Image (tube, rainbow, N blue to C red):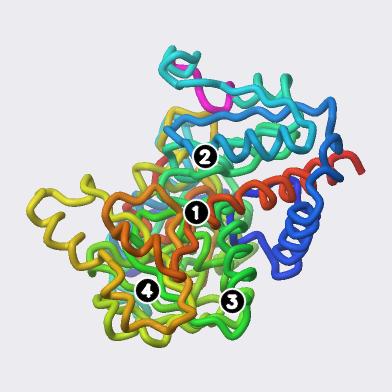
Amino acid sequence: MSEHELRVSKIRNGTVIDHVQGGQALNVLAILGIDGSEGLSVSVGMNVPSDRLGRKDIVKVEGRELSPSEVDVLSLIAPEATINIVRAFDVVEKNRVTRPERVVGVLSCPNRNCITNAEEPVDTRFTVIADGVRCEYCSTVVRADIAAHIDV
Amino acid sequence: MRQDHLITATQLSRGDIEAVLDRARAIAADPTAYADRHAGTVLALCFFEPSTRTRMSFDAAAKRLGIDTIDMGDVSASSVSKGESLADTVRVIEGYSDALVLRHPSEGAAQMAAEFVDVPVVNAGDGAGQHPSQTLLDLYTIQETHGLDDLTIGVMGDLKYGRTVHSLATALTNFDARQHFISPESLGLPRSVRFDLHETGAQIREHDDLGAVLPELDVLYVTRIQKERFPDENEYHRVAGEYQIDASVLEAAADDLTVMHPLPRVDEIAPDVDDTDHARYFEQAHNGIPVRMALLDSLLESTHE
């Protein structure tokens, strides 16, 4: 058993999000709305050595199977991420994240004058474009550092 | 035009634009034929920012179609001053009217409003975003003076915050237009507009000096550079002075150059230009009536079908 496997223990049932770019694990949890209050058992490995990424993060969520629609939004900050569904300690399903067409309610618009930053009863909504996202209300284009705009 | 709302110029196809302009031309030729066309209909004017031309021309256009108008009045005297959300305001006013014209200081306000109501919403300016009904009357003016294809247009002034510029630049991508943008570097086109222009493969060039491009222009569209965009008044005067035109500047232009401005102007077009054949900005403002009549006519017609 290698050293990094010892650091993050196996789960019985749930979801393992692997190959997350190093340093993004907490943003992954934020996007998924997992903050501990729901009682899920969560393990996080950060900056684990990786052949593919150099350094990677791993997030293991015990007792919850995340659907593709829930995790596709992760592609914005962790495009290489793989989603493993685990049942009885076995990986029964392994998927890559795919880019969604639209992201609702996860990001805040960096344009302070956007109506979504006023006190209005509306979720943010971004269209995913080739190299970023675009606000569907004010048209602001966000390319760099999308993680900085996570608002959950 | 088969649209429920008019929110941005990006939603307008060439066919949509030509349909409104054709209808506007028919209205201008025989306005009395449209006088009672929408009798019994009510249009709500909801202006959360000051407006003279847009508010009055929508009001006048509506009345010339037989439409009654109700006006929210000054924001400071409305329930907005009590902290009511825009979403609540438009849902209430929807019950009083058959269509809404909305001006608001936040970008995206009209889009959001349209999601909360079932009546047509016309964006009459959302912050530094879009002003598509102005664009329709700008296009009408260009079509009347030069034509919309094989057009070389220069757009000068505040391109960053100028919502009329954003809508016009986007709408012109439907036509065979070469667009030149002339501004100080700090007031160049915003990334969102560049994105739309890039997506359509539009032919654009950017300059910091009008002189280099003036002789080849068919249309020069001038906008106001606002003092509040500059941290320092001296800097404002220095920069704004470089983007002002007068009759002597226009001596280098083609004889049939059309000069346009969405108004109000301050000193970016000197009064001596008014007396030249280039000046079309007052005619442009007047075109707001037939064009907004055509727009309201087509939006209300769609809701009746």
For marks 2 and 4, the one nearer the N-term is 2
Residue A80 appears in the figure: no
Looking at the picture, which amino acid does disc 4 mark? Phe
Residue ID for mark 4: B181
Q: Where residue A99 sits: x, y (%)?
A: 56, 66
* Crowd class of label 1 (few under 14; some 14 to 19; many from 20; radius 10 Å): few
Residue drawn at x 59%, y 72% as measured from the top left: B145
Give the Cα distance between marks 2 and 4: 27 Å
Residue B237 appears in the figure: yes
Residue ID for mark 2: B109
Give the Cα distance between marks 3 and 1: 17 Å
- Decide: is B109 above or below A92: above
- Which quadrant holds residue B163? bottom left
* Crowd class of label 3 (few under 14; some 14 to 19; many from 20; radius 10 Å): some
Given this view, does label 2 or label 4 mark the residue nearer the observer? 4
Q: Give the residues in magenta.
A: B83-89
Q: Relative to residue A128, is residue B143 drawn left or right? A: right
Given this view, does label 3 or label 1 mark the residue nearer the observer? 1
